[in-house]
Image (cartoon, grey):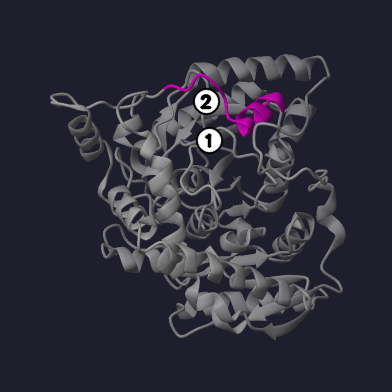
Amino acid sequence: MHELADAYRRGDVTPTAAAEAYLARIEKLDGRVGAYLTVTREQALAAAKAAEGRYRSKAPRGPLDGVPIALKDLLCTRGVRTTCASKILENFVPPYDATVVERLAAAGAVMLGKTNLDEFAMGSSTEHSAFQPTRNPWDLARVPGGSSGGSAAAVAADLAAGALGSDTGGSIRQPAAFCGVVGFKPTYGRVSRYGLVAFASSLDQIGPLAKDVRDAALLLGAIAGPDPHDSTSVNEPVADYAAALDGGVGGLRIGVPREYFTEGVDPDVQRSVRQAIAVLCELGATTQEISLPTTDYGIAVYYLIAPAEASSNLARYDGVKYGLRAAGAKDLIDMYGRTRAVGFGAEVKRRIMLGAYALSAGYYDAYYGRAQKVRTLVRRDFEAAFAQVDLIVAPTAPNVAFKHGEKEDPLAMYLNDVFTVPANLAGIPAVSVRCGFSAGGLPIGLQLIGKPLDEPTVLRAAYAYEQATRWLERRPNLG
């Protein structure tokens, strides 16, 4: 992205030429990858033409002006359908833009289209879309991760210069790791959720997926900041994330949690992450082993809280106000049942039932209430750790990308989020950057986790590591 903007300023290429090149590549390759659900060709070319005029007038809006990006298809886009990869919203066209969409448009970014996801962001493989699976550009037989798999695959396959995703329990970072791109989850509230179709409102967070850390910093800078439409947004100034990248890691104290390096972690992942830690030490950081004792409870807590909130949020899809309405109902209750039976996929139904049960009378305190108490303990674990260290480093996922259909057991799929869920429960920032490859040539992700609102330090450490290694030189071969 930053290289493209530099080329615009030099006059080496125009925004229109860049948009046309990306659109041509999407037409050529996306039938194999399946990253996009909707391609907004005419809208993209119109935005690119407008950006071109600004560059000719020597008045670009900033580093994202004319840059082609993709949006996960649960961000509302005025006049462009927003499906959440669900039959129940297959033909839904929002009357307004999400705040992040407005902010990218104000920065001059060019929207290429809307990317695929697990239905309503519920999944870790982008196999649970109602319309199509997405495939990993490094190996089309494998998943790209999820739920932001379409956005991660689009960036990895050069079908977009950058993208936005959402992260409820790892849905930006895990696909970033599987696809070998950078994925950043900000502090909860750092980026407005207005216009994000809700999955779990206390956990959802919008963030960037990009080729490198500088691009991620530029995207984050464009979308971050308080928003009067979102009462949970944080009313704090936004740092210049790109300007803060060059400070290095000298003197940083980095914690290595023993609970994130267990027997279940793929040996290639363990090796690559350990080597990455050694690189950070060579760059001037110091490391120490720390403990996050409640890590083992993270998945259980998440899969009580997130489905409970989902069951409440998804109650609005009733066939009355908007979205799908099943025909042939004999009364209102029958219409609700028919509409939801046809409109929701199996994984969404599973989570709605789990959540409704956890919230039901007689079980609320035993399940949802207790999960919220353990969530507090998870947050306190991080607070205690950050009293000793500045950053925490860990694997992003316990394994590399797996094959389509390999994890049909829901529990096996849920365990893919074991190292990403705790940061969501605590509401703290975290990034995944490429740190190596498996013996089979698949990317491996390094996760850096920071203190609340300390995005600059997380990005600075990730950038220092990225600049000290050559992992970005490898690209998937799609032709």
Quadrant hosting residue 120? top left
Residue 327 is situated, as x and y percent measured from the top left of the image, at: 17, 24
Q: Nearer the viewer, mark 2 or mark 1?
A: 2
Q: Quadrant of the N terminus?
A: top right
For residue 455, above or below residue 33: below
- Mark drawn on residue 71: 1
Tell me the residue that label 2 is attached to. 77
For residue 324, above or below residue 252: above
Q: Nearer the viewer, residue 244 or 188?
A: 188
Residue at 74% over, 41% down: 221
The amino acid pointed to by label 1 is Leu
Task: Tell me if label 2 and label 1 are in contact, CB under 8 Å.
Answer: yes
Quadrant hosting residue 91? top left
Please rate how many residues cluster around mark 1, counting C-alpha atoms within 10 Å: few if below 14, some from 14 to 19, many from 20. many
Residue 149 is situated, as x and y percent measured from the top left of the image, at: 44, 48
Q: Is residue 267 magenta?
A: no
Magenta residue span: 93-108
Taking the image as shown, residue 179 lies to the left or right of residue 8, namely: left
